Image (tube, helix red, strand yellow):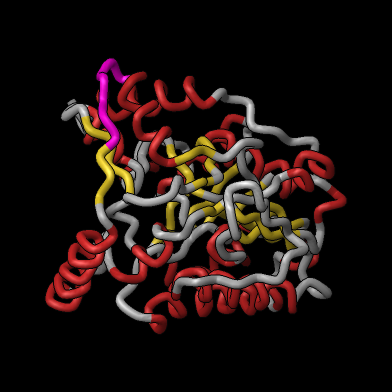
Amino acid sequence: MSVLVTGGSGFVGSHVVEMLLSKEHDVVCPVRNPLSSRHLEKMPVRIASLDRLEALLDEARPEYVFHIAGATRALDYEGYRRANVELTGRLLDLLSRSEALPTLKRFVLVSSQAASGPSIHGSSFRTEEDPPSPVSLYGRSKLEAEKLVLQRSGEIPVTIVRPPTVFGPRDVDVLGVFKCARFRVAPCIAGPDRFVSIIYVKDLADGILAAAFAPNAVGETYFLANPKPVIWRQFAVRVAKLMGYRATALPVPVSIMRVAAWCGDLKGRISDTPPLLRSEKLLDITQVAWVCSSEKAYRQLGWRPKVPLDEAIRKTAAWYRTHGWIR
């Protein structure tokens, strides 16, 4: 079976590609720069330039398209819109007039919990039926992409998945928590406990495939997360403990975080590259709760996360150490 994966060279995308290959599917990965696809180097996939997307669709005639490509960081909304909305629209337009359309079984958009927005508190789980209320430019762009996809659902069989915070091998965003463990500290934002839904990347990849192959998932949206959220402070301490360190939670005042975020904004403008910590990101991480319910996915897809949290942390730390990302 032929499958096309955008964003296959990225963190989540590369794990989806690995899982597809393990099921013996033929995978094509259009990427922006075929020379810098390090996560795909040892995988038996066809790598092509994203500039050839139209011809690629006609040649490969994929039965399934996983649209994972996009930007999690940008300097302004226009940057997010180009990467997350316009690229999605372009792909849908190309599919609608492609020779692949008659045999296309599913178009899966990997969106984000950010499109839905935060929760009121740690026990207030957002569901797919709740009105979206994104608080960041990133979340707004992902919601706009979702709306674009659903508008085409009469023509193209679509499914949307919304991952929460994702961690695992190859991730760079949660890497900082693992790096800090060596210094016996677990940084967290001062103030109330902050609750976060979380998912191990291999469980997420499994859920994305479950959503793609489920006949009843056409036109549906799913959160894919562990049943229980974590308190971020406790999660950071847990990471250190499982790595063999006794760490102490280090609450960082929001005022200091604001200064750091402002410096990140300035650095981004100077370098034209958005850093991880910036004012927009601070708006997200200072929310009291980012928790969502995956009961719909559990019920309709027959999917549940399989890797216990402690095991996922150990596997992630082992990968980081093996590849020299942490000591």
Residue occupying image coordinates x 49% and y 53%: 29
Give the residue at the far front of this rendering.
191
**209 displayed left or right of 134:** right
Q: In front: 40, or 289?
A: 289
Q: Position of residue 280 (x, y in %)?
A: 36, 70
**41 displayed left or right of 305:** left
**48 displayed left or right of 270:** right
Q: Position of residue 39 (x, y in %)?
A: 36, 42
Main SS category, magenta section = loop
Q: In which image quadrant can residue 102 be found?
A: bottom right
Residue occupying image coordinates x 51% and y 26%: 309
Residues rendered magenta in the picture: 243-249
Q: Is residue 287 magenta?
A: no
Where, quadrant-wise, is the N terminus in this rendering? Answer: top right
Q: In which image quadrant can residue 180 be found?
A: top left
Q: Is residue 25 above or below residue 145?
A: above
- Residue 189 seen by the camera: yes
- Residue 54 seen by the camera: no
Q: In front: 225, or 86?
A: 225
Give the residue at the far top of this rendering.
244
Q: Is residue 205 above or below residue 281?
A: above
Q: In front: 75, or 264?
A: 264
Residue occupying image coordinates x 51% and y 35%: 200
